[in-house]
């Protein structure tokens, strides 16, 4: 069944948005140095949203044969739903917007290639220390096709491939973790080697003094922190309802002049031709030299405040539904090594735990450090464990330096960041 037929039927009941996603995945899993499974999985999902006036209904199905029932369910939900504050907008008609990011190398990956990659990772770990083991690891390829159409004629098509890896290397009670996602095949063995050398460093354990020190936070930890606190602060609906620290700070200098943030739907790991409503993707400046310039909106929240959508609808299941595309913290000029060398005494943090307890409105957070290192005289001296940081993110972002290296594994793209005067708790 084609999307035009589904959309034509759905629009009999109101304004319709329909999205069809087909995905083919291959997944290899390892535990305790052994390959436990390798399997292929093919999935299909149809998403339907129908709105009329101030009411909407949503339904989805993994079986395209049930498309009529899915439409009927959306209509039923719409009829009994509570009216929203205003009528629900629909993206305007557009020519078919396409994005295609296909790697033939990923397309042509066979099971034997996955098995070889797994063995290569294992060898890279054992080459550092034969007693180290792969606690857990996954390798996967994703081939997906997404189609969108609404009753105004807005339409998009995206084809993409991805190669993913997660890896945890351990020795006794020491575990270091890593992950990577790319549009092309990458060197998986480098991650095994890097993590194994981190485990070696972890064997030299010391304590960190309980006092305020400069702290460098690595991308993996930052992506967790920013997803929990920073990105919700730029949600336009949160701002409208004063559920954001930034609700009254548009145009004001709030952060360090070193901080520049954009949301980019056109470039980055999570790029796409349109958002889930069919609004063409765009680039939005959020912070410029510390000043708040814009917030993120879907069609509904934008209409509430008399603005245009920034193409940030992340789901059809809720209204509003606002999420970042590629939330990019722009890099600085110094290398991470130079930032470390600039610190007489401080801490380097790879991972944190407890971001779910952070307060996204005030910015207060208290996090444990499962993986980090004490910095002494500009060098990583020894591993620290059972330590914590206590900070307010919004205050901390007023005094920062950013590395020139940038990394992205999800919707967050960020350099490593040096914060000053962060409370460490031993």
Image (spheres, rainbow, N blue to C red):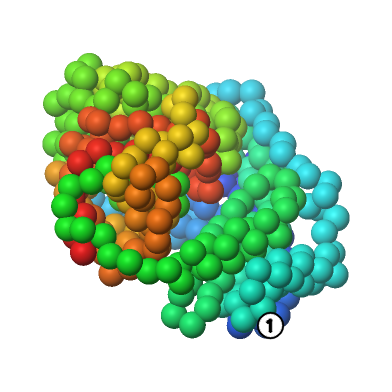
Tell me where residue 408 appears, x and y as whole percent: 53, 43
Instruction: Find disc 1 in the rendering and name its residue.
Output: 34
Q: Between 192 and 30, which is closer to the camera in this rendering?
A: 192
Q: Quadrant of residue 366?
A: bottom left
Question: Is 112 on the left or on the right of 5, as rendered?
Answer: right
Residue at the image point whose x is 47% and y is 39% from the top: 336
Asked if one can make out residue 373 in the rendered structure from this viewpoint, the answer is yes
Q: Is residue 72 above or below residue 172?
A: above
Q: Quadrant of residue 97?
A: top right
Q: Quadrant of residue 140?
A: bottom right
Residue at the image point whose x is 35% and y is 49% from the top: 376
Quadrant for the C terminus in the image: bottom left
Outermost residue to the front = 377
Tell me where residue 317 appears, x and y as whole percent: 40, 52
Question: Is 255 on the left or on the right of 123, as rendered?
Answer: left
Q: Between 37 and 197, which is closer to the camera in this rendering?
A: 197
| Circle 1 SS class | strand
Crowding at mark 1 (Cα within 10 Å: few <14, some 14-19, many 20+): some
Q: Between 64 and 232, which is closer to the camera in this rendering?
A: 232
Residue at the image point whose x is 34% and y is 26% from the top: 259
Tell me where residue 158 appears, x and y as whole percent: 66, 40
């Amino acid at each position: 069944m084609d999307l035009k037929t589904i959309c034509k039927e759905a629009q009999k009941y109101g304004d319709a948005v329909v999205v069809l996603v087909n995905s083919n995945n291959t997944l290899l899993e390892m535990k305790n140095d052994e390959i436990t499974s390798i399997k292929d999985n093919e999935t299909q999902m149809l998403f339907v949203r129908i709105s009329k006036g101030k009411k909407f209904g949503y339904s989805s199905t993994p079986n395209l044969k049930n498309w009529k029932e899915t439409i009927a369910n959306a209509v039923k939900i719409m009829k009994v739903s509570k009216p929203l504050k205003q009528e629900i907008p629909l993206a305007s008609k557009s020519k078919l917007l396409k994005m295609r990011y296909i790697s033939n190398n990923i397309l042509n990956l066979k099971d034997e290639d996955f098995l070889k990659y797994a063995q290569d990772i294992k060898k890279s770990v054992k080459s550092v220390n034969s007693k180290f083991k792969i606690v857990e690891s996954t390798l996967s390829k994703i081939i997906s096709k997404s189609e969108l159409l609404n009753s105004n004629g807005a339409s998009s098509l995206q084809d993409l491939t991805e190669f993913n890896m997660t890896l945890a290397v351990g020795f006794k009670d020491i575990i270091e973790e890593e992950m990577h996602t790319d549009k092309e095949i990458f060197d998986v063995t480098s991650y095994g080697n890097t993590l194994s050398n981190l485990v070696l460093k972890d064997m030299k354990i010391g304590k960190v003094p309980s006092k305020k020190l400069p702290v460098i936070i690595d991308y993996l930890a930052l992506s967790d922190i920013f997803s929990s606190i920073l990105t919700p602060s730029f949600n336009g609906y949160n701002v409208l309802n004063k559920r954001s620290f930034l609700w009254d700070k548009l145009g004001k200098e709030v952060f360090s002049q070193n901080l520049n943030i954009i949301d980019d739907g056109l470039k980055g790991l999570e790029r796409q031709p349109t958002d889930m409503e069919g609004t063409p993707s765009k680039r939005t400046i959020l912070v410029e030299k510390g000043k708040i310039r814009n917030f993120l909106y879907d069609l509904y929240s934008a209409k509430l405040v008399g603005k245009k959508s920034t193409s940030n609808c992340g789901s059809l299941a809720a209204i509003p539904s606002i999420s970042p595309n590629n939330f990019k913290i722009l890099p600085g000029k110094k290398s991470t090594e130079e930032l470390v060398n600039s610190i007489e005494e401080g801490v380097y943090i790879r991972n944190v735990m407890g971001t779910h307890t952070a307060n996204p409105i005030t910015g207060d957070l208290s996090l444990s450090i499962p993986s980090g290192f004490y910095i002494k005289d500009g060098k990583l001296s020894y591993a620290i464990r059972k330590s914590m940081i206590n900070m307010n993110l919004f205050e901390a972002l007023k005094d920062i330096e950013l590395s020139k290296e940038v990394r992205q594994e999800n919707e967050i793209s960020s350099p490593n960041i040096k914060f000053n005067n962060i409370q460490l708790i031993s």
